[in-house]
Amino acid sequence: MSATGTRGTETIATAHRRRLDPAALAPIAGLAFVLVLAAVTTPNFYSPEVLRLVLFQAGIIGIAAIGQTLVLLTGGIDLSIGGVASLTSVTLAIYTAGDDTKLAIGILLCALAGVAVGLLNAGLVVIRNVPPFVATFASFVLIQGIIIAWTRGAPSGRTPPALGWLGTGRIFEIPVSIVLLAVIALVAGTVLGRSTAGRRLYATGLNPDAAARSGIRVGLVIAVCYVIASLSGVLVGLINSGYIGFVDAALVGKLNLDSVAAAVIGGIALTGGRGRIWQTIVGTLLLASMLTWLIQLGAGGGAQLVFSGAVILLAVLLQNGRQSLRALIPTKKGTQ
Amino acid sequence: MNTNTWRLSGALALGLAAALVVAGCSAEREDDSGSGAAPEDCINAEQAQAEYLASWDSVSQAFGLDDLVPVEEEVCEVDASAFKADPKNGDTYQIAFAAQGPTNSWGTLSDEALRFRAAELGVDVLYAAANGDATTQVDNIQQLTSQDPDAMVVVPMGEGIAGQVKAAADAGIPVIVCSGILPASSGAVSTVTRQYDLLGSAYAEWVAKSIDYQGEVALLSGLAGVPTAEYQLAAAKKVFEKYPDINIVTTQYTLWSPTEAKTVAQNLIATYPNLAGIWSDSGYGALGVVQAYQEAGLPVPPITGDSFNQVLMDTQGTDVEFAFSTFPPEMSSTCLDTALSLLKGENVLNKVFIDSPSFLAADAEQYIREDCSGDLPVPSLAPEALLVQLGLCEG
């Protein structure tokens, strides 16, 4: 990369970092609102058991949402994360058949499968210029087809007991999944906010043509994000397998929805280039708290979907409203 | 906090409040639908009715119930003379099979049991898989109809396919609805299924009896809006309404996923520590509940569901009280038999209600198949050779 190119991307990222939009605080206000509502309507929400549930759910959703965030920042979307999680569950159960001694190789196989899916998505998006929505949805369908053809629709096998710790274990009474999320979020946040790689990613998402002209290998940046997103699906698949100890292929679609929802609710722009990891974490906590609170409230499945949909819509409307407002209000240097 | 932020927070609050109101008003109950053709003159009604009542008696006895009242159904014989026909193409009947598709072990067994039976009988099968999607199934039925089969067997993915089934019937193809129900307006000649009302009611009656007709009960259904789930749920609610001392504290959906069910159950443990019983429409739901309570070190409330191998293995040797029955995928072979009977001019029932094993925890051990996949619905009536061929059991 040329010196000029590096400076250009640094300028974009630095300006982005310094400009803290007050409207970005809306998800925090939303989270606070849900927490207050929960305190008023379901005081039991703050019992250690329920809080652990919220944290466990947040761990699962958040890990996938961080992978999704990286892809969203490039201006893409990954609808295959749930499929990868399902493929992981099936691969692990079939290969290991519940044998702990095969766990390491089983995890390696799952990771390789995840990388393969990530590369497939990246290839379709970067090389073939297929719209990310279409490419990753096609991958999702393909994975489902492979699972059905491989298992003839009847996946079998147990998850190795040693993996149970990942799904049901606790560290100082805190679910392992949320600890993993914290570590991953810290690493992702640091890389995005304080490294050249992060600046390249934001530049790619904001304006891929300009980023390419400044010397950034845009294709490589996008490919890496899709691979990481797929690997996040692998990790979620492993946690889910450890949680239930049984092949469960029924959750694929829900994870896709939740991962996108958490990122969007947090304020990650669907148009790419804008958003921080902490926003995804806030969106994740908001979503996990809300889903748990609704169950505590005794709301049925329909009500949960209506409520989740309304919050996502509201988040998107707020994002669009913010952008429209910026476009309308002239600044000293012109419009943004 | 500046004005803009207050405005946004207010908007979020308003949105949440609006969503709550809408959510509170959402209805998840579907109307009950009739099934099978409504004959003008009920032929051989007495014998047909006796066969229908037998399936209720069998469950009553297995669960030790005195209060299980069969829902009213008019079961009659269909005069098959109008459907008697030679094969349209060559010497072999061609039966179209609009299937669910192998999206899970139930779907796989449903498909393969019909194919296995067809091979035994020397019948050609025109197969189309919906992969669980009603819209895909509408296209499938249209395409199958255009191939002019001698008869059609449809595993319905939802009531939305009724119009296309009617079109097939109007084209002169006798249609058998299999493992599900459609409105009478679909024009299907016969419906072959395990009765949703029976399962939903029997599970509810057993839960009520197990908790001495008092206490808090949670309902765990499968998928909101899906007839298979909603019919059973509606039947259960109707039963619980009879008992004023039973309080249904919540109705949740598990997506027929043990993972989701476990999460829901962990919430139930925290929110309703005095839960006396859990009505579940599926074994997947029961598996999640059992794991959640066991991990919390709590006794598992009496629970219900359809039986599959893994949940029996996981409850073996425990003191978990349960009542399980089955929704056997192998009933597809009976659907094929019914279609062929029609074509041969043999009268069939307009509603064939499949009877299948129901049992309590004390009798469960005999149904465990250590040599088979945890995902296998048990007891399985499928031929052993087929289970081995599908990789569901060891040879």
Image (spheres, coloured by chain):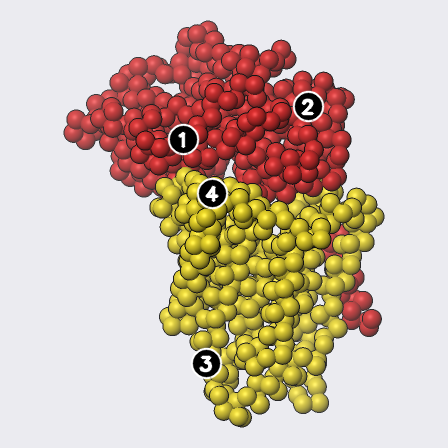
Q: What's under tag 4, amino acid-wise?
A: Gly
- Chain with colour red in the figure: B
Which chain letter goes with mark 1?
B
Q: Position of residue B363 (x, y in %)?
A: 53, 18
A28 to A126, vertically: above or below: above
Q: Secondary structure at mark 4?
A: loop
User: Disc 2 and disc 1: Cα gap in Å?
Assistant: 38 Å
Which residue is at a point 35% across and 36% down the rendered structure image? Answer: B391
Q: Identify the mark nearer the N-term, 2 or 1.
A: 2
If the image is split into quadrants, where does the N terminus of chain B sit?
Answer: bottom right
Q: Position of residue A178 (x, y in %)?
A: 65, 56
Q: Mark 1 = which residue?
A: B371
User: Disc 2 and disc 3: Cα gap in Å?
Assistant: 64 Å
Q: Mark 2 = which residue?
A: B240
Please tell me whether mark 3 or mark 4 is closer to you in this view. Answer: 4
- Chain with colour yellow in the figure: A
Q: Mark 4 = which residue?
A: A98
Callouts 2 and 3 in the same chain? no
Q: Secondary structure at mark 3?
A: loop
User: Disc 3 and disc 1: Cα gap in Å?
Assistant: 54 Å
Q: How many marks?
A: 4
Give the side of residue B210 with respect to residue A131, left or right: right
If the image is split into quadrants, where does the C terminus of chain B sit?
Answer: top left
Please tell me whether mark 2 or mark 4 is closer to you in this view. Answer: 4
The answer to which of B70 and B395 lies nearer the viewer is B395
Which residue is at a point 40% across and 30% down the rendered structure image? Answer: B371
Q: For the residues labelled 1 and 4, say whether their Cβ atoms are less than 8 Å apart.
A: no
The residue at the far top in this view is B46
